[in-house]
Amino acid sequence: MTEQDGLRREIGVWGLASNSINIVVGAGIFVLPAIVAERLGAASVLAYILCGALIALMMLCFAEIGSRITVTGGSYAYIEVAFGRYAGFLTTNLFIFGAAVMANAAVANALGDTAAYFFPVFKLQWVRVALFITMFGSFALLNIKGIKSGMLLVKFNTIAKLTPLLLIVLFGWLAFTPGNLAWTATPSLSDLGEVSLILLFAFVGIETGLNVSGEVRDPRKTIPRSILVSALTVVLLYTFIQVTAQGVLGDALPDFQEAPLAEVGRRMLGPLGASLVVIGAGFSMFGNLSGFALNMPRVIFAAARDGVIPPKILARIHDRYQTPHIAITSYAALACFFACIGEFRQLAMLASASFLLIYLGVILAVIKYRIAGNDEPGAYRIPGGYLVPASSAVAVLWFLSNLPSVELRAMVVFLVVMTVIYLALNLLPKRGNAR
């Protein structure tokens, strides 16, 4: 399925891959090595391999469905086309409120804290509010002017955030001790599963780059290639960073929970190395924000265009720039508002579960299309029949089984509330008209 909605198709393989990498490589990678090493020690690499393999299965499902349904909206579009408006409504709200706006607000505050590390004035609330307004306003303006402007910013942030990480991987041998990689024990399955669950949350986001599918050149070839490039890049980068951090810090790695890679940089290059990593963390957070500012308005645009969420004005396209300017402005304003009023720790767990449920919906969409025999000419098809989608579904359910009961209850409440809203929007007006 393709669309003709007036959007320009200008994004190629490397632009789309950069978009995905920019989103998934966030602030987490700068603290992740210590968290993983605390439970698994030198055997941490096992969790990366396991999580990378499971993510690869899921991304293959995204590659297949993304080459069949090449419309703007990403996961929302795939699930809505496969299962109808109610499923699309839930997916849209899981994306917008469970996995984007609140997460953006938290990252924005983290970026303010990073700025305060160098400039204490950013500890003042009014200065932080001014920073958020300027930042989100700039994101909106760039993206309204055109997808090329947004993609240039994404590519710049991708390079800026990856530079200190690549320096650690390439020059970590300067302070590397091979003996630090020796295993002292084999982790239990429960420890491996729990840590892999944490790692999954560090990997999620590759598929978010597909929200601009309606603006991709030759999507049936570009989408599968970009997904595979971005997934492989992230898995290798994370694994090498963990091995380097373990080799440099050894058993002391868990002691640096707040900034393990900054300590790695300090031992490599002294204070300059630590500063480079901290600056890289700042660019990473900024890149994460700019990436979501580019992608999430396309979800809102697609949902409003299809009548899944009100109001219809969100689906308007700018006469001059041919971009969804109302959706872009609305998303930036909403994210900025929550960033200004504070943190959202209570919803952080909900964001994690949201991604898992969306993954499950996409995987089920692949299976449904397979059963229905809806083969688009030239579409990518995963080899091995139903093995990959079935294995992916089992993997997602396994991850969900490791979620805390509090998070599961919060997700149920959220879904119930969204269901009530959907019924109010779609059934009550019809009954009123019938009278």
Image (cartoon, grey):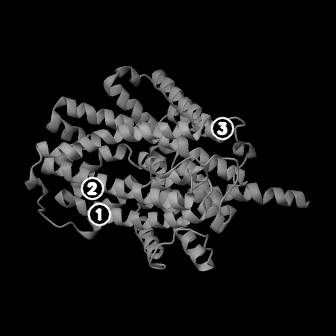
Separation (CA) of disc 2 from disc 1? 8 Å
Q: Which residue in the protein does label 1 denote?
A: 49
> Which disc, if any, is residue 239?
2
Residue 419 lies left or right of residue 296; in this view the side is: right
Q: Which residue in the protein does label 3 denote?
A: 325
Residue 358 lies left or right of residue 35; in this view the side is: right
Which sits in the foreground, 8 or 140?
Answer: 8
Where 33 sits versus 259, above or below?
Answer: below
Residue at the top extreme, as displayed: 121
Question: In which quadrant of the rendered image does the N terminus lie?
Answer: bottom right
Where 280 sits versus 56, above or below?
Answer: above
Q: Residue at x 50, y 30 (%)?
A: 135
Dot 3 or dot 1: first in sequence order is: 1
Dot 2 or dot 1: first in sequence order is: 1
Q: Residue at x 21, y 30 (%)?
A: 272
Which sits in the foreground, 258 or 317?
Answer: 317
Q: Are marks 3 and 1 in contact (CB under 8 Å)?
A: no
Residue 284: % across, % down: 38, 39
Separation (CA) of disc 3 from disc 2? 39 Å
Q: Residue at x 21, y 45 (%)?
A: 170
Q: Are marks 3 and 2 in contact (CB under 8 Å)?
A: no
Q: Secondary structure at mark 3?
A: helix
Q: Which residue type does callout 1 highlight?
A: Ile
Q: Which quadrant of the figure has residue 195?
A: bottom left
Q: Secondary structure at mark 1?
A: helix
Q: Residue at x 45, y 76 (%)?
A: 383
Q: Which residue type does callout 2 highlight?
A: Thr
Residue 319: % across, % down: 72, 37
Task: Decide: few, some or many residues near mark 3? Use Cα within 10 Å; few <14, some 14-19, many ≥20.
Answer: many
Quick check: can you spot residue 187?
Answer: yes
